[in-house]
Image (cartoon, rainbow, N blue to C red):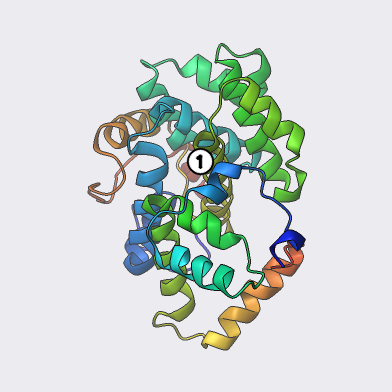
Amino acid sequence: MAYIDLPSGFPGISGLMVYRPETAKPLNELAQALLAAPSTLTPGERELIATYVSAQNDCYYCQNIHGAIAAHHLRGNEQLVLNVKQNYQGAEISDKLKALLAIAGKVWRGGKHVTTQDIERARQQGATDLEIHDAVLIAAAFCMYNRYVDGLATWQPQNADFYRSRGAIVGEMGYVNLKREPVDIEDTAASKAAG
Amino acid sequence: MESKMKPMFLPEVEKNSQPSFQADTIKMLQAKGEEYPLILHLFAYRPEATAHLTRFTREVMRGDSPLSEGFRELIAAATSAGNHCLF
């Protein structure tokens, strides 16, 4: 149960966005600019950074929805998403993305943990200043989104099919033109808690 | 004055200000030879993304709310102190 009275049937951040559309609009536009707008990093790479940071923050909803969006962009490769969350150094991703994930991990621990060596390593792997900039901003923004979602204890259904189908929709539509409607899904965790 | 300011990690961010009110502010303060917070460069570099952050901040800090603007700034200041972010 969320800590405040949110509209029912809207999981994770979507309930907060329906509750407070004034702040939701720029938050969605920021997500669109960072994750979905044209960039030299693919949408799959950028969603992997968002997923990794969300997993580090232990945000169930965010890591699963963005993991599903990432998988959608990565031809359904859910195993790769899992590998990045668990040990990205051993995952089948580019060295450039590994260097950007290392920076994202430092931003997650705290911005001051990022060092000139981290930046240099990313540059050596071919990352541009714009790519490094965006990786840092994605990591910082997701620390905010994750805390927003968990800080109000939003409903986070434990249903892999929900994330899979929603992830495909967001992957196609992006963040700004999304329709938000209440969902009616089997939530194994919630029914267990109720019982 | 400017020599006292440490360079940023990403020189391109400092060199490539896009049209924005932050870029105007940077120019004005540079012309006066004053030090200025480098967060202005972050916002001027990538306004396609950061303009939304500006709008978000304006809404959450200055928009309609039962919390006074002063109290909201106290929350922001306390959180920044907790994060050891001096600015």
Residue that badge 1 annotates: A134
Residue A110 locus on image (x, y percent): 72, 49
Q: Residue at x 47, y 26 (%)?
A: A45
Decide: is A192 above or below A6.
Answer: above
Residue A136 shows up from this direction: yes
Q: Which of the two residues, B43 or A27, is positioned nearer the viewer here? A: B43
Q: Which of the two residues, B62 or A40, is positioned nearer the viewer here? A: A40
Q: Secondary structure at mark 1?
A: helix
Disc 1: which chain? A
Residue A150 locus on image (x, y percent): 56, 54
Q: Which of the two residues, A76 or A5, is positioned nearer the viewer here? A: A76
* Amino acid type, label 1: Asp
Residue A3 locus on image (x, y percent): 53, 65
Q: Residues within 10 Å of mark 1 (few under 14, many from 20)?
A: many
Residue B36 locus on image (x, y percent): 63, 68
Q: Quadrant of the C terminus of chain B?
A: bottom right
Q: Residue at x 48, y 48 (%)?
A: B16
Task: Please indicate whether residue A114 sits to the left or right of residue A5 in the image.
Answer: right
Q: Which of the two residues, B57 or B87, is positioned nearer the viewer here? A: B87
Q: Quadrant of residue B10?
A: top right
Q: Residue at x 39, y 29 (%)?
A: A43
Task: Please indicate whether residue B75 sits to the left or right of residue B43 in the image.
Answer: right
Q: Quadrant of the N terminus of chain B?
A: bottom right
Decide: is A3 above or below A175.
Answer: below
